[in-house]
């Protein structure tokens, strides 16, 4: 098992190399000149040139690339021009914020979409089936930043139920000591319920925004997969054997439907990582997405490259996790076979 | 008294494209320990009938008339509650294509345990021991090891044995076998049929064998019921039906099966197709459009014709009349 995981990780190396090359080229192809940007509107031509030399931008592209790769291999992801901070430090301190938000959105979507899909499949034509189909159609047509803004407008601005959409925690509360970097968990670890509640309140709107985005594909896939499995021959065998309806539904049908649902879950999780960027911007969430956007606007290469690389690594781990989960559910898919 | 008695059962499917009158006025009887072969070409309603007996028919199905009695109990009473209590315990069923009829991601031993856990008080070690015993009963070699196998690791014949083990786990009084050998190779087919017959004899279990293989039915069943387009057109002792078939359909079928080896699907002997069961103008005799003996009076409801002892046909002009 461990050997297989290792093999899979090694197998991902070519992909990562590809990502490194492509992001390097893409950032260089971006409009805007970082040297000019940082010299400011008042910067003289000499000042711009000076910055250019300092950043190594006067060198040829292959040279720049080799230097970049050399630094990466030493664990040096470069520094942000804007903050002067090491990109790696920035990303690692911001990653938990993004992950906490994404996971909350995903969990929220899963606990709503999966029961909804199951109910819709077991009662075709019922109101819950229509609801499921309605959500599936509505969900795909709304972009996340729009839902985010709409939710913030309604629940913060109009109703005042939600706290101001500014970051992970009310400024009057201080963040819990970092253990996992997830405020919900860290606050509980030190038993600070105020912080827990505060963090949860801040999380709700952006998490709901993300959840709404992926609710549709998840519910639709659960429904379709359940419908498919429920008409399978082995379900008839189970019913003919007089098994309890709950056993038939969960042990027999749902566990089999889980496979396509898991594939969708993985896909949806990748969507979420991507759409995080916009949602973080809307809710001033201090995650890696908002960090990347700011860097992008400033043509700040190192953070953008670091961000893309982080995402690529996340995808690799995500796919591995899904393959392992597959094997747990389906003996035909055990990855060491 | 018979163990299973289906009395004048009618069943229809309400579908978007119309009402499918899949069963009409169907009656069957099967004594304790007996074996009945239900034969007829594909689409004649054999599976629908057997699903109805077990109460596992499609949600679109409606039983519009008739009764199903099992050991004196009315299976349809109380919205089928009686049936639910008996299903898997007293009545069991096995299906065709065994490789897809088992849960693909559950160990076969666990699938047997699921049934035992549901219907018995066995738990823990004794439960497992009994599941292994069930595997041994259907002559699966090395049952301890096979307990942990998944269906995809077993051959079709092995999977059918597992399905039989599941069905027989609670020692039912009736086993319905719906084309149990379809999807298996010829040698395996024979082995599975012998297993079903032997276990039936050993345990005094009645079997309802559904097949479109007349030779198979002749070899393994004491009684035969011939089905056509949702009607039972003739029923009687196997040899009587083969020797003196009365209904033109049964006559054509048996004539087309001389040595009991050919399979119905291979025979082009019966011209025409089953009528579309959604038609609103279905004739009283659903064989009329394919029948050589059809006459004007065939349009009125079918009479019951006693061919011999326990041998009945539903036809206005049974072939027997001529021979006599
Ligand atoms: N769920 C269903 N909905 C509508 N029609 C059905 C359904 N199931 C079976 N039928 C129809 O009932 C008839 C009998 O089918 P079936 O019992 O499967 O035939 P057999 O088992 O004899 O080959 C066929 O005409 C089939 O189209
Ligand atoms: S009733 Fe008439 S049409 Fe039907 S099988 Fe008998 S002879 Fe043929
Ligand atoms: Mg069938």
Image (cartoon, grey):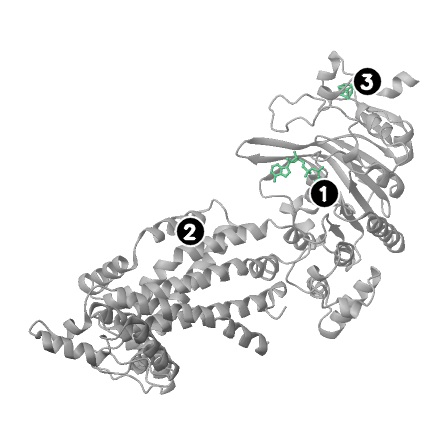
Q: Say which chain tag 1 marks.
A: B
Q: CA distance from mark 1 to mark 3?
A: 29 Å
Q: Which residue is mark 2?
A: A132
Task: Give left or right: position of B174 versus A303.
Answer: right
Does the residue tagged 3 have its C-beta within 8 Å of any atom of ligand 2? yes
Residue A239 versus residue A188 in the image, above or below: above
Residue placed most toward the observer, A271 or B78: A271
Task: Give left or right: position of A237 versus B318.
Answer: left
Residue drawn at (6%, 74%), measured in percent from left and top? A42
Residue placed most toward the observer, A157 or A245: A157
| Local SS, label 2 | helix
| Local SS, label 3 | loop
Q: Residues within 10 Å of mark 3 (few under 14, many from 20)?
A: some
In the picture as drawn, the residue positioned furthest to the top comes out as B296
Does the residue tagged 2 have its C-beta within 8 Å of any atom of ligand 1? no
Q: Residues within 10 Å of mark 1 (few under 14, many from 20)?
A: many
Does the residue tagged 1 have its C-beta within 8 Å of any atom of ligand 1? yes
Q: Which residue is mark 1?
A: B50
Q: Which residue is mark 3?
A: B317
User: Ligand 2 is located in which of the four quadrants?
Assistant: top right
Residue placed most toward the observer, B63 or A235: A235
Q: Say which chain tag 2 marks.
A: A
Q: Quadrant of the C terminus of chain B?
A: top right
Q: CA distance from mark 1 to mark 2?
A: 34 Å
Q: Quadrant of the N terminus of chain B?
A: top right
* Disc 1 to disc 3: CB gap under 8 Å: no
Task: Give left or right: position of A65 versus A41.
Answer: right
Badge 1 or badge 3: first in the primary sequence:
1
Image location (x, y in percent) of residue A291 = 26, 73
């Amino acid at each position: 098992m461990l050997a297989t995981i290792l093999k899979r990780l090694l197998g991902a190396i070519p992909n990562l190399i590809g990502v490194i090359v492509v992001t390097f080229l893409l950032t260089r192809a971006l409009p805007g000149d970082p040297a000019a940007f940082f010299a400011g509107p008042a910067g003289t031509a000499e000042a711009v040139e000076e910055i250019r030399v300092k950043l190594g931008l006067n060198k040829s592209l292959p040279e720049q690339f080799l230097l970049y790769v050399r630094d990466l291999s030493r664990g040096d992801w470069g520094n942000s021009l804007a903050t002067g901070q090491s990109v790696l430090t920035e990303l690692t301190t911001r990653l938990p914020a993004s992950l906490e938000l994404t996971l909350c959105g995903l969990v929220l979507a899963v606990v709503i979409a999966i029961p909804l899909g199951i109910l819709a499949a077991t009662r075709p034509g019922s109101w819950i089936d229509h609801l499921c189909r309605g959500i599936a159609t509505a969900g795909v047509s709304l972009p996340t930043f729009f839902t985010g803004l709409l939710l913030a407008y309604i629940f913060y601005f109009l109703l005042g139920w939600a706290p101001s959409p500014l970051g992970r925690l009310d400024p009057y509360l201080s963040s819990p000591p970092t253990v996992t970097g997830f405020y919900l968990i860290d606050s509980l670890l030190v038993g600070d319920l105020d912080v827990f509640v505060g963090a949860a309140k801040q999380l709700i709107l952006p998490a709901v925004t993300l959840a709404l985005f992926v609710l549709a594909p998840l519910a639709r896939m659960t429904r379709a997969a359940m419908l498919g499995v429920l008409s399978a021959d082995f379900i008839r065998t189970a019913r003919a054997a007089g098994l309890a309806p709950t056993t038939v539904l969960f042990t027999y049908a749902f566990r089999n439907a889980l496979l396509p649902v898991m594939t969708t879950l993985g896909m949806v999780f990748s969507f979420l990582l991507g759409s995080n960027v916009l949602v973080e911007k809307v809710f001033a969430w201090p995650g890696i997405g908002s960090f990347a956007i700011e860097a992008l606007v400033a043509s700040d290469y190192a953070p953008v490259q670091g961000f893309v690389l982080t995402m690529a690594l996340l995808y690799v781990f995500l796919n591995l996790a899904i393959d392992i989960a597959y094997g747990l559910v389906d003996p035909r898919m055990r990855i060491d076979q | 008294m018979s163990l299973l008695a289906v009395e004048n059962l009618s069943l229809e499917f309400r579908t978007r494209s119309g009402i499918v009158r899949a069963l009409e006025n169907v009656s069957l009887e099967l004594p304790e320990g007996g074996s009945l072969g239900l034969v007829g070409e594909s689409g004649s309603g054999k599976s629908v009938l057997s699903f109805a007996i077990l109460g596992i028919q499609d949600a679109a199905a409606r039983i519009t008339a008739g009764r199903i009695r099992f050991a004196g109990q009315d299976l349809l009473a109380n919205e089928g509650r009686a049936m639910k209590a008996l299903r898997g315990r007293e009545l069991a069923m096995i299906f065709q294509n065994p490789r897809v009829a088992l849960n693909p991601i559950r160990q076969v031993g666990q699938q047997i345990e699921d049934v035992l856990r549901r219907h018995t008080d066995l738990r823990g070690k004794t439960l497992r021991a009994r599941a292994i015993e069930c595997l041994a009963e259907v002559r699966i070699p090395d049952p301890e090891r096979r307990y942990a196998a998944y269906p995809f690791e077993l051959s079709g014949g092995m999977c059918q044995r597992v399905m039989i083990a599941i069905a027989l786990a609670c020692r039912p009084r009736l086993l319905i076998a719906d084309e149990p050998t379809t999807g298996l190779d010829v040698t395996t087919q024979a082995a599975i049929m012998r297993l079903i017959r032997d276990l039936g004899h050993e345990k005094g279990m009645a079997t309802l064998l559904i097949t479109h293989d007349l030779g198979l039915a002749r070899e393994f069943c004491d009684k035969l019921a011939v089905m056509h387009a949702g009607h039972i057109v003739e029923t009687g002792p196997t040899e009587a039906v083969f020797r003196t078939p009365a209904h033109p359909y049964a006559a054509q079928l048996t004539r087309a099966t001389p040595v009991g080896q050919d399979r119905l699907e291979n025979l082009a002997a019966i011209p025409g197709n089953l009528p579309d069961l959604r038609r609103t103008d279905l004739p009283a005799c659903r064989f009329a459009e394919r029948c050589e003996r059809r006459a004007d009076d065939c349009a009125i409801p079918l009479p019951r014709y006693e061919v011999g002892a326990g041998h009945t046909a539903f036809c206005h002009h049974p072939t027997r009349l001529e021979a006599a």
